[in-house]
Amino acid sequence: MTEPDEATRTTGRGEPIRVLIVDDHALIRRSLEMALAAEADIEVVGEASDGQEAVELADRLTPDVVLMDVRMPRRSGIEATREIKASAPSVRIIMLTVSDEEEDLFDAIKAGATGYLLKNVQLDEVPEVVRGVHEGQSLINPAMAAKLINEFANMSRKEAERPPQLPVPRLTDREMEVLRLVAKGMNNREIAKQLFISENTVKNHVRNILDKLQLHSRMEAVVYAVRERMLEIT
C-alpha cells in the first residue's frame, strides 16, 4: 500500500489547506505568505488589503482558513469576519493583530473567529496554527484566554437578571464538562488529559455540542452557554 503524502495525512482529503491572507500592510502579507509557501499541505490562494476585498475574495476563492487583520480601512476585520461566516460558516478565521484589548477579542469571537493571535507570533508557528484551526481547534494564546474568561464572567453577571428566552438544548453531563474546559481556554489535548479520554472522543463531544446548539465554533458555544446560563464563569 502506498504511504500517504504529507498533505493527505494533514488534511485527510489529499488537498492542501486553502488560505486567504488579509492585512492592510503589504509587508505583513508578504511575511505570512513566505511562512506558508514552503508547506506542501498549505496553499495561499489569495491576499486582500481590506475587509471589503476580503469578503469578495472569500466568496470567490472559497478558502478553508482566513488570516484576518482586525483593524483595516473600508471594512474592519471583525465586520468582514461576520459577513464571511454568515455566507460560509465552515470557513475558519484567525484574527491576527497587534491588539490585546478585551473588547477586540470578545468582538472577534462573537463574529465567529476561531483563533486570535498577536502579530508578534513567531512566523514559523503560523503553519501549525493554520493546521490546528483547520482541524477544528480554537487557538487563543494563554494570556488572551484569561482575558476572554474575564469577559465571560462579566457577561454572566450582566445577564443574571435577564429572563431566559427560548428553551435551550440539553447537553449531557460529559458534554457540559467538555464545554467548561473549552471555556477555560483548553485545547483538545488538554481536555483529553483532564478527563482521561482520547482526543478523538473530545472532538466527538465538541461536534455534538455544536450540532445541538446549531453553532459553528467552540467559542460561540461558550458565549451562548454563558448567555443562556448553562455555564457560570466566575
Image (tube, helix red, strand yellow):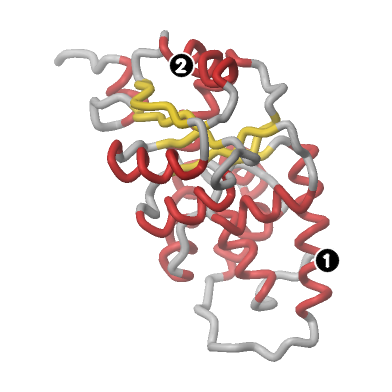
Disc 1 on helix, strand or loop? helix
**Image point 35% across, 30% down: which residue?**
18
Rendered view: 164 above or below 129: below
Residue type for callout 1:
Asn
According to the picture, the residue beneath numbered tag 1 turns out to be 154
**Image point 58% across, 15% down: which residue?**
27
Disc 2 on helix, strand or loop? helix
According to the picture, the residue beneath numbered tag 2 turns out to be 36
Q: Quarter holding the C terminus?
A: bottom right
Q: Position of residue 94 (x, y in %)?
A: 55, 38
Q: Position of residue 33 (x, y in %)?
A: 47, 16
The quarter of the displayed image where residue 135 is located: top left
Q: Position of residue 115 (x, y in %)?
A: 59, 41
1 or 2: tag closer to the N-terminus = 2
Residue type for callout 2:
Leu
**Image point 76% across, 42% down: which residue?**
144
Rendered view: 234 above or below 183: below
Residue situated furthest front in the rendering: 74
Asked if marks 1 and 2 touch (Cβ < 8 Å), the reply is no
Rendered view: 73 above or below 159: above
**86 vs 189, nearest the viewer:** 86
The quarter of the displayed image where residue 92 is located: top left
**215 vs 54, nearest the viewer:** 54
Report, in whole angstroms, how far the alpha carbon at label 1 lies from the one at label 2: 38 Å
